[in-house]
Image (cartoon, rainbow, N blue to C red):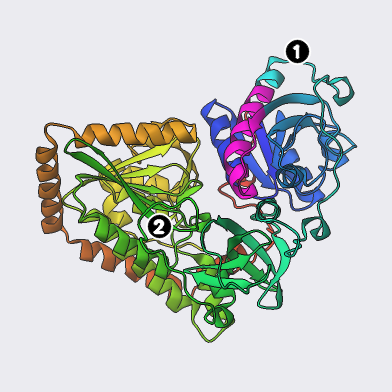
């Protein structure tokens, strides 16, 4: 079928659904929901058999839903209605939640039900739940609904006739509903409120006496701060986060957005103010500590003489600033000295890496700094990190992608010997969507040797997301593993242990070092880097401001004015509906 995805943005759910539907033979085109007239034009051009709306912020116009079957993906259980479904569920501490696919009608979220799927609701950030449980449940439900529609004889169930409809109409959650009372709210309550607002819209609060929105919270179980501190007091800082006292403990706040600005690491958003706080470094930075906030950790699994090292790095939204790249490179260099012969880079739960930190780069424009200079520093730090990984001669290295990866993060992963991705993870191994960036991270060395020259050109030119399964099929990754998060970690540990116990591991490592030496002799890594950075220098400092304009709009969440042509196939010149 021809299926039009009508969406507010090309977010992770839209990417996953588009890829899954294409895999099943459907012809997909995408239109951003900018205005009624634009959506109407898209329908007239594409003449879809079905319209699926995975992510909307307003109602589909009557002129469309009266003439076409439009399936709305609602992040709520059957009967739930309203724009803040997931927010209310998280803040209320619901134990189970779901996704409902319903048909668009005049009354919002009240159309007949085509499919639904349930999931246990973790105590976690809304953004994390959306990328994982909601996306997986939505994929299951949408594929089922599309099958129902294709069958031609399915009758959706009117909401009033649903025996399992236990949801209700909920209003838009306002900041008054999210407000934190630092004197009365315990840590668990504050955490639920911030989690329910992450990553949009955040909780309106204040830091250092200034109004802001806060995001990215983590409870602290040990550090309590000064004995005379009061609930609401700021106690300490660590890397990008600040510690704030609650009624019964404390929690870390990782990100903040000052009035009129954009989301930044908390210690950067309040750079001048936070330096007055005492530092609270981890005594053993590498030791995994679930009772405090840490963004880099290391652990080992040992069996007899075989050991595997696991390097974790949990960077918010997968963005890696200059300093984060430098700290991760130092951690990697340290891990390479450990008595292990297999080293697994685990990344984070939601993202492995998305490359350079565009928000931190944009922040340079707020003061006397230069976004071009910060871009240059950041890409060189990424390159240093990638080279540290490429030149690992004493271990077999594995990038284990539990979460999504994009742009330079994809090629940083490819710098490992093996890349294993969790089924459900989405990869965007290209740069051009960000103002026609050329890209670096040694991709001109790493990509062609995996997929060939033509395969590399196709990936970089098409600018389309890859599912984990498709990435393995193309050769970009080496395996697509279990979709369940726990099963993925178990599978990764088992496979890594098998490599560590392999009787020919010494021969594998010797062959790896020989290949690297041959590659270096044929063309040094420094040459690849110099060639890539020549293009990047033009992106950052040249006459064409496309990268800076694109970054500015991305960071500041500007509303889209059009749908990119590589997504809106129906707007290609000469495109015609197949007869």
Q: CA distance from mark 1 to mark 2?
A: 53 Å
Q: Earlier in the sequence, mark 1 or mark 2?
A: 1
Q: Secondary structure at mark 1?
A: loop
Q: What is the residue that sits farthest to the bottom in this orientation?
A: 368
- Decide: marks 1, 2 in contact (CB < 8 A)? no
Q: Is residue 338 left or right of residue 25?
A: left
Q: Which mark is residue 427?
A: none
Number of other residues with Cα within 10 Å of mark 1, as a class: few under 14, some 14 to 19, many 20 or more: few
Give the image location of residue 285, x and y in percent. Answer: 37, 61
As drawn, which residue projects farthest toward the top?
153
* Above or below 116: residue 239: below
Residue 541 vs residue 515, the one in the foreground: 515
Quadrant the C terminus occupies: top right
Tell me where residue 508 sits by quadrant.
Answer: top left
Under tag 2, what secondary structure?
strand
Residue carrying label 1 = 153
């Amino acid at each position: 079928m021809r299926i039009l995805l009508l969406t507010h943005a090309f977010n992770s759910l839209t990417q996953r659904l588009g890829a899954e539907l294409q895999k099943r033979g459907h012809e997909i085109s995408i239109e951003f929901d900018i205005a009624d007239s634009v959506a109407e034009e898209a329908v007239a051009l594409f003449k879809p058999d079905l319209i699926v709306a995975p992510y909307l912020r307003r109602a589909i116009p009557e002129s469309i839903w009266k003439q076409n079957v439009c399936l709305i993906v609602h992040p709520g259980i059957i009967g739930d209605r309203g724009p803040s479904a997931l927010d209310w569920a998280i803040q209320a501490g619901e134990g189970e939640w779901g996704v409902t696919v319903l048909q668009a009608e005049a009354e919002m979220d009240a159309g007949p039900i085509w499919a639904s799927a349930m999931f246990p609701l973790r105590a976690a950030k809304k953004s994390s739940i959306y990328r994982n449980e909601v996306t997986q449940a939505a994929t299951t439900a949408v594929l089922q609904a599309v099958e129902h529609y294709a069958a031609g004889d399915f009758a959706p169930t009117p909401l009033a006739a649903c025996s399992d409809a236990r949801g209700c109409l909920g209003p838009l959650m306002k900041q008054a509903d999210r407000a934190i009372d630092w004197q009365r709210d315990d840590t668990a309550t504050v955490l639920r409120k911030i989690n329910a607002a992450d990553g949009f819209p955040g909780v309106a609060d204040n830091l250092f006496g200034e109004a802001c929105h806060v995001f990215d919270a983590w409870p602290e179980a040990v550090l309590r701060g000064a004995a005379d501190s009061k609930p609401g007091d700021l106690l300490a800082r660590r890397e990008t986060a600040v510690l704030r006292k609650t009624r019964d403990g404390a929690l870390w706040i990782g990100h903040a957005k000052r009035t009129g600005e954009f989301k930044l690491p908390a210690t950067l958003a309040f750079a001048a103010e936070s330096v007055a706080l005492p530092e609270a470094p981890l005594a053993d930075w590498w030791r995994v500590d679930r009772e405090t906030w840490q963004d880099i950790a290391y652990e080992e699994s040992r069996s007899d003489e075989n050991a595997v090292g696991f390097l974790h790095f949990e960077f918010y939204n997968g963005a890696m600033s200059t300093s984060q790249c430098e700290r991760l490179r130092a951690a990697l260099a340290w891990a390479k000295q450990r008595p292990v012969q297999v080293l697994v880079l685990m990344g984070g739960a939601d993202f492995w890496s998305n490359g350079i930190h565009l928000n931190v780069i944009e922040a340079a424009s707020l003061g006397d700094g230069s976004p071009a200079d910060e871009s240059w520093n950041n890409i060189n730090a990424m390159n240093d990190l990638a080279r540290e990984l490429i030149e690992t001669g004493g271990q077999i290295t594995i990038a284990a992608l539990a979460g999504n990866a994009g742009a330079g993060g994809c090629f940083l992963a490819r710098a490992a010997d093996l890349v294993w991705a969790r089924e459900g993870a989405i990869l965007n191994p290209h740069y051009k969507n960000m103002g026609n960036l050329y890209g670096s991270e040694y991709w001109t060395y790493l990509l062609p040797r995996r997929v060939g020259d033509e395969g590399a050109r196709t990936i970089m030119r098409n600018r389309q997301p890859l599912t984990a399964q498709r990435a393995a099929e193309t050769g970009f990754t080496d395996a697509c593993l279990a979709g369940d998060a726990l099963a993925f970690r178990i599978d990764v540990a088992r496979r890594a242990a098998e490599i560590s116990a392999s009787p020919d591991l010494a021969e594998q490592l010797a062959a790896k070092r020989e290949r690297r030496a041959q590659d270096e002799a044929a063309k040094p890594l420094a040459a690849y880097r110099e060639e890539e950075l020549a293009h990047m220098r033009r992106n950052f400092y040249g006459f064409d401001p496309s990268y800076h304009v694109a970054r500015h709009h991305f960071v500041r969440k500007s509303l889209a004015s059009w749908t990119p042509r590589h997504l809106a196939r129906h707007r290609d010149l000469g495109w015609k509906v197949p007869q």
